Image (cartoon, rainbow, N blue to C red):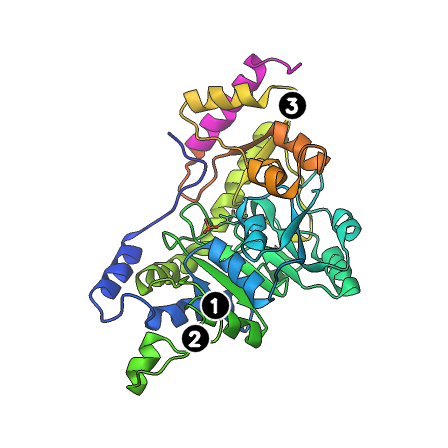
Amino acid sequence: MIPYGRQNIDDEDIAAVVRVLKSDWLTTGPKIGEFETAVADYVGTSDAVAVNSGTAALHAMMAALQIGTNDEVIVPAMTFAATANCVVFQGATPIFADVDPATLLICPESVASLVTAKTRAIIAVDYAGQPCNYDRLRQIADLHNVPLLTDGCHSLGARYKHQSSGNLAAMTAFSFHPVKPITTGEGGMITTNDVALASEMRRFRNHGIVTDARRRQETGTWFYEMQSLGFNYRISDIQCALGIQQLKKLDTWIERRHQIAVQYDEAFGDDDGIEPLARLAESRHAWHLYVVRLKHQSRDSVFRRLRTAGIGVNVHYIPVHLHPFYRQHFQTGPGLCPNAESAYEQILSLPVYPGMTNEQVNFVTGQLKQSAISSGRAA
Ligand SMILES: *Cc1c(COP(=O)(O)O)cnc(C)c1O
């Protein structure tokens, strides 16, 4: 089976993890700060806060802004559920913005139309690894004095007009799940230039407690204070050692992902039924996903044929407002975000990961074109 995404682990990565396993600190030791500094330097922010998942990173951003009951946070409909769930964790209401049909990125005009007196934040998702229209989103956020945040779980390594994803919004959440741009097994990070928010999030990841175990040992004191309610969202040194190694290879991997995307583009250029998503000229795409829209064929039957052929195609995503939880608790449903809903019927994510070979890409393009033909035209 050719998966849609896959991690890349080499002997250096393994050796780095083994060194931590043999050291004194398995968690909350020196590797945390080292990984945070490496990511902050990479994206160009002053601060980075490492946590144990992308979801924890999103939650920490909400908590740092003290989002709570009666607050609204605007999120795109076309994303992974966690982008909206983090709003619900805080007792607030996610408001679903529609997406641009060409890129499936959050539509700034939809965002503008949804801002109310209750809006406390906007979360943009760099869907598939392509940065959103930040110039326009910042204008809207600034006009209403609402913080603009990024769910950058797809976009570490992407750039918008020479600024890196991670430094395009007040705070950005990253994920280090194995299919994401770099991995720590499970893990996440928030990048920001706001030192106060960063320290709120450091506290939040550790039960709301102000000193960590290492500092207590260094200063030889038993004292700690819980100043607010937090969680155990800590990441381990074992994981951060892996992350530090992975980050060194990110740019090479994005280059390889880009080559694969070009190969796909070329293969589908002469096929009016297979339409890759549009790209913005001002951006460097991180190519977390390569998504096509099937214009004439039934996506479901193409999906089944490709899976049978051993190709791990996928669908990103079921619009979040269509999930039963949101329908039940927030009275959402079909018709709320028509662009996301009609895209959902047609989209297919093709395999793309750094270790994918040209032969595998050719196999995917051949199989897709063939299944698209034999699946016939959708009614
Ligand atoms: C992966 C992902 C998340 C969640 O990250 P985890 O590390 O799995 O918790 C959130 N949002 C988006 C858009 C994602 O792709």
Would residue 66 be visible to someone looking at this image?
yes
Q: Are marks 2 and 1 in contact (CB under 8 Å)?
A: yes
Q: Which residue is mark 3?
A: 273
Q: Which residue is mark 2?
A: 226
Q: Are marks 3 and 2 in contact (CB under 8 Å)?
A: no
The range drawn in magenta is: 360-379
Residue 98: % across, % down? 71, 42
Residue 374: % across, % down? 55, 13
Q: Amino acid at mark 3?
A: Gly
Tell which of 56 and 267 is nearer to you: 56
Q: Quadrant of residue 241?
A: bottom left
Quadrant where the image shows the N terminus: top left
Is disc 1's CB within 8 Å of ligand 1?
A: no
Give the Cα distance between marks 3 and 2.
58 Å
Does residue 134 sit above or below 66 in this rendering? above
Instruction: Categorize mark 1 by other alpha carbons within 10 Å: few (<14), some (14-19), many (20+).
Output: few
- Check disc 2 and report its element: helix, strand or loop: loop
Q: Which residue is mark 1?
A: 229
Would residue 317 be visible to someone looking at this image?
no
Q: Nearer the viewer, mark 1 or mark 3?
A: 1
